[in-house]
Image (spheres, rainbow, N blue to C red):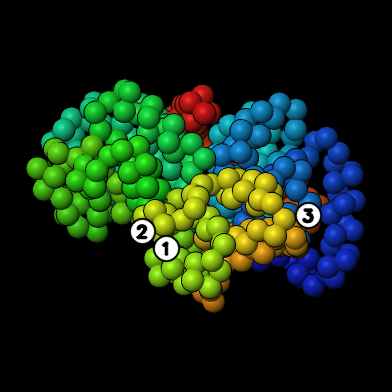
Amino acid sequence: MYFSLPKEYREAKPEDIKARILEAKKKLGKNLLILTHHYQRVEVVDFADHLGDSYGLSKIAAAQKDVEIIAFCGVHFMAESADILTSDFQKVFLPNPLAGCPMADMAEMADVMAAWKYLDKISGTENIMPISYMNTTAGLKAFTGRNGGLICTSSNADAALKWAFEQREKVFFFPDQHLGYNTAIKMGFSPDEIVIWDFSRDDGGLTEKQVSNAKVILWKGHCHVHTNFKEEQVHEVREKYPDVKIIVHPESPHEVVRLADGSGSTSYIVKYCQEAPPGSTIAIGTEINLINRMALEYPDKTIFELSGQTCPVCANMYRTTINDLLYTLENYANIKPISVPEPTRSEALIALEKMLQIS
């Protein structure tokens, strides 16, 4: 996909852009809603009507009944989910259409279907519950809905796995292996009951016995931001700051999560920073834009990034600028909205609605 802003928007001065965004918001009034993920740039966050993680923003999108224009400052799978959860007359726009998700791209439909076929041969898919992380395409959300499963986020992964095991014997979780592993271990499953399906190898690199014995089958996918965090970084930070509290996202490797003082979604991390007493020292293992914003908002606390100089930035979240947002607000009538076709939309909606129900 090719996308380029017109020169007028690329070269506009920041103060003019901000003034025009405010004017556009005023003009559109209650017909406009700007949803913004926690990982967005600070200057984009400033114009958010609602700020949250993918789960929280999904709930907000589902609750909208009258808003006609939704500008989703996030990545493609989030805007797709908002389109699925809203009515036909509502239009969802992604200000930068190139904002994707490498993790979502790690689970191709053909690869997932091949895995599902192999799992069916061994265990019978009627005994396996598919759980799709929010970071997947609409097509895989639809696959999940068709097969009785649900969508989860880092906010409700515990509830999702609990629900799944109340229904079936095994769980097939994709595409983030670390969130799945950390959640399964937290629920009391042993490492011997968890296997990784490597989509680059025949039969996922697993024997029939391994699949048969497994309770949790995880897709070999990951978030490149959160795999920046290492066990040695935790030890180094604790040595340097004896009173530090280390908070990480559960997409991080298990050896990091088990050493942290807390692990949770971006909303959990934000809440932790809000509620920590003045003078607290907090090292955070997640995307750098959120960490920087927390440090700015709570100057009475020492908040910094866990991994030191690696600068864990989500390049796709970082794509969206106030220039993009302004262009969307001033030209929405001539921009193609995010639109998920049928039957993908209806089948994905089944899985997304289950996500909202169990939480």
Q: Earlier in the sequence, mark 3 or mark 1?
A: 3
Q: Which of 24 and 62 is in front in this view?
A: 62
Q: Position of residue 115 (x, y in %)?
A: 23, 44
Asked whether the viewer can see residue 236, the reply is yes
Q: Quadrant of residue 40?
A: bottom right
For this view, does 182 lie left or right of residue 43? left
Q: Which amino acid does label 1 sit on?
A: Thr
Estimate the spatial distance between the alpha carbons at disc 3 and disc 1, rounded to whole Å: 29 Å
Q: Where is residue 98 in the image (x, y as percent from the top left)?
A: 57, 59
For this view, does 285 lie left or right of residue 91? left
Q: For mark 2, what is the residue? A: 255
Q: Which residue is drawn at 75% across and 28% down?
A: 66
Q: Which of marks 1 and 2 is nearer the N terminus?
A: 1
Q: Which of marks 2 and 3 is nearer the N terminus?
A: 3
Can you tell which of label 3 and label 1 is closer to the viewer?
1
Asked whether the viewer can see residue 224, the reply is no
Rendered-image quadrant of the N terminus: bottom right
Q: Which of 209 and 260 is in front in this view?
A: 260
Q: In which quarter of the image is residue 8?
A: bottom right
